[in-house]
């Protein structure tokens, strides 16, 4: 797209102030800016923010706002962000008022009034009707299968999706296991700012991943259950013993709905580290990935059973760092090339073979990993394609932009 647009990206950097989540959203901004678009970040999820220092919901938003301000400053976006704290009360009875941080209220209104597109990633905007003056509201689904099932079971969430003009999903492959929500879901991948990832770092001789045992509850649709990552991981507990002497390290959270069986994992040969110690910040997370030999990981059971074609943004960061990935197949081939750089598996035996193949021909796989990242995950290319798709389906957006004039 040659036209330069005013683009708002909405995400959850302040809501979940940890390195991996931050990279998920900031790379949209970097990709769009590299194309010459004017970008702003607005967060208005209507959720009470998570504070990792308190291992749960914080008392208020100070920690989250300071983190978000630091991130935006790092990428020369210090005057281009806004965070709305929804306010509310704690069980103690303390009441906290709604507050806006970052852009002044007047400047925030101007940015919204002159925006051409708002890209709402993972419901970083909780109530899209607040932003209905923007000509094109775009929803990006980062959690395929779960999102579509929720849409047909939860009328309020369905209304949330309906308020958007275009819909994209990280589930690249349509599947009969996923209900039809009535929306036109366009395929999308996690954008990666390739130049932010260094493929020349010295590596440890360890396969790693960053994961939660569980993130939220399982779901059922059409008599079939769709679960979390723990359900798949249990099938591969014996990998360290079968793939010895290769070492496998998990930067693993405890789990939300079910707790990780840490003693069992250690007994089976998995090395465990605390993600909030080893890879909590932007640089820590990036360093952890860059200094790994590669990634080995499973996917959420829903992604596997739903054959969604989902591919992890974290795995894409490994690729950008020149680190091959041995990852559970969710149906992401043929949209992505596999066999070299990306090695897919379905069974324990295939996982063992994949690890040994990557370890034996690491340089070959490393070169391919970086090449795949550049060809398939480049943030500029993916965000440009998104805007092209939105523009082609919305002939009124350009006219509306002309009528409003340039951003002051």
Image: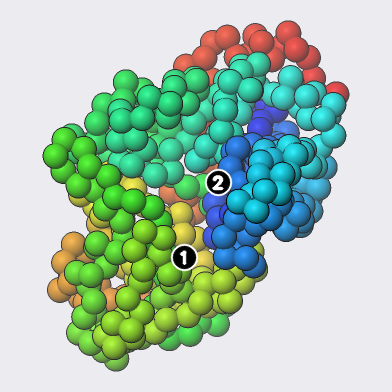
The answer to whether residue 129 is visible is yes
Judged from the image, the secondary structure of the residue bearing numbered disc 1 is: helix
> Relative to 128, does residue 33 appear above or below in the rendering?
below
Residue 187: x percent and y percent? 38, 36
Q: Which residue corresponds to the image point at 49% horizontal and 54% vertical from the top-left?
A: 374
Residue 24: x percent and y percent? 54, 51
Task: Identify the mark at residue 186; answer none if there is no mark.
Answer: none
Of residue 161 and residue 113, the one placed in the foreground of this image is 161
Q: Is residue 101 left or right of residue 52?
A: right
Picture quadrant of residue 115: top right
Q: Farthest front residue?
A: 93
In which quadrant of the rendered image does the N terminus lie? Answer: top right
Disc 2 versus disc 1: distance between alpha carbons?
15 Å
Q: Which residue corresponds to the image point at 70% horizontal and 28% vertical from the top-left?
A: 6
Q: Farthest bottom residue?
A: 245
> Relative to 337, does residue 100 appear above or below in the rendering?
above
Of residue 240 and residue 324, the one placed in the foreground of this image is 240
Q: Is residue 130 left or right of residue 38?
A: left
Q: Which residue corresponds to the image point at 43% horizontal and 38% vertical from the top-left?
A: 141
Q: Which residue is mark 2?
A: 379
Q: Earlier in the sequence, mark 2 or mark 1?
A: 1
Judged from the image, the secondary structure of the residue bearing numbered disc 2 is: helix
Of residue 357 and residue 325, the one placed in the foreground of this image is 325
Crowding at dot 2, Cα within 10 Å, few <14 / some 14-19 / many 20+, comes out as many
Q: Which residue corresponds to the image point at 44% horizontal and 22% vertical from the top-left?
A: 159
Q: Which residue is mark 1?
A: 318
Q: Is residue 170 left or right of residue 106?
A: left
Residue 351: x percent and y percent? 22, 71
Residue 94: x percent and y percent? 71, 49
In which quadrant of the rendered image does the C terminus lie? Answer: top right
């Amino acid at each position: 797209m040659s036209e330069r647009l005013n683009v708002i990206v909405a995400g959850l950097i302040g809501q979940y102030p940890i390195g991996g989540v931050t990279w998920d959203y900031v790379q949209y901004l970097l990709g769009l800016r590299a194309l010459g678009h004017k970008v702003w970040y607005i967060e208005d999820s209507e959720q009470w923010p998570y504070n990792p220092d308190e291992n749960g919901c914080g008392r208020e938003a100070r920690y989250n706002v300071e983190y978000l301000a630091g991130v935006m400053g790092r990428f020369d976006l210090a005057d281009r962000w806004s965070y709305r704290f929804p306010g509310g009360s704690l069980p103690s009875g303390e009441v906290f008022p709604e507050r806006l941080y970052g852009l002044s209220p007047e400047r925030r209104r101007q940015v919204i009034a002159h925006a051409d597109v708002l890209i709402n990633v993972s419901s970083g905007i909780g109530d899209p009707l607040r932003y209905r003056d923007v000509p094109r509201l775009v929803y990006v689904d980062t959690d395929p299968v779960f999102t579509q099932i929720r849409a047909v079971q939860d009328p309020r969430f369905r209304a949330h999706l309906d308020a958007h003009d275009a819909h994209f999903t990280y589930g690249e492959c349509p599947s009969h296991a996923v209900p039809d929500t009535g929306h036109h879901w366009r395929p999308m991948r996690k954008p990666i700012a390739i130049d932010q990832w260094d493929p020349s770092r010295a590596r440890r001789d360890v396969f790693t991943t960053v994961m939660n045992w569980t993130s939220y509850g399982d779901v059922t649709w059409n008599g079939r259950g769709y679960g979390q990552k723990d359900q798949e991981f249990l099938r591969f507990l014996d990998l360290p013993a079968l793939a010895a002497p290769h070492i496998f390290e998990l930067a693993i959270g405890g789990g939300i709905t079910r707790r990780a069986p840490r003693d069992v994992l250690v007994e089976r040969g998995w090395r465990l580290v605390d993600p909030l110690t080893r890879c909590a910040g932007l640089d820590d997370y990036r360093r952890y990935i860059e200094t790994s030999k590669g990634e080995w990981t499973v996917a959420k059971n829903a992604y596997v059973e739903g054959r969604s074609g989902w591919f992890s943004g974290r795995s894409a960061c490994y690729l950008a760092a020149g680190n091959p990935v041995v990852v559970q197949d969710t149906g992401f081939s043929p949209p992505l090339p596999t066999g070299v750089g990306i090695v897919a598996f379905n069974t324990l035996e295939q996982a063992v073979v994949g690890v040994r193949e990557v370890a034996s021909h690491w340089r070959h796989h490393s070169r391919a990993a970086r090449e795949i990242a550049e060809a398939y995950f480049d943030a500029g290319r993916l965000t440009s394609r998104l805007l092209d798709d939105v523009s082609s389906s919305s002939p009124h957006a350009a006219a509306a932009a002309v009528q409003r004039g340039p951003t002051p």
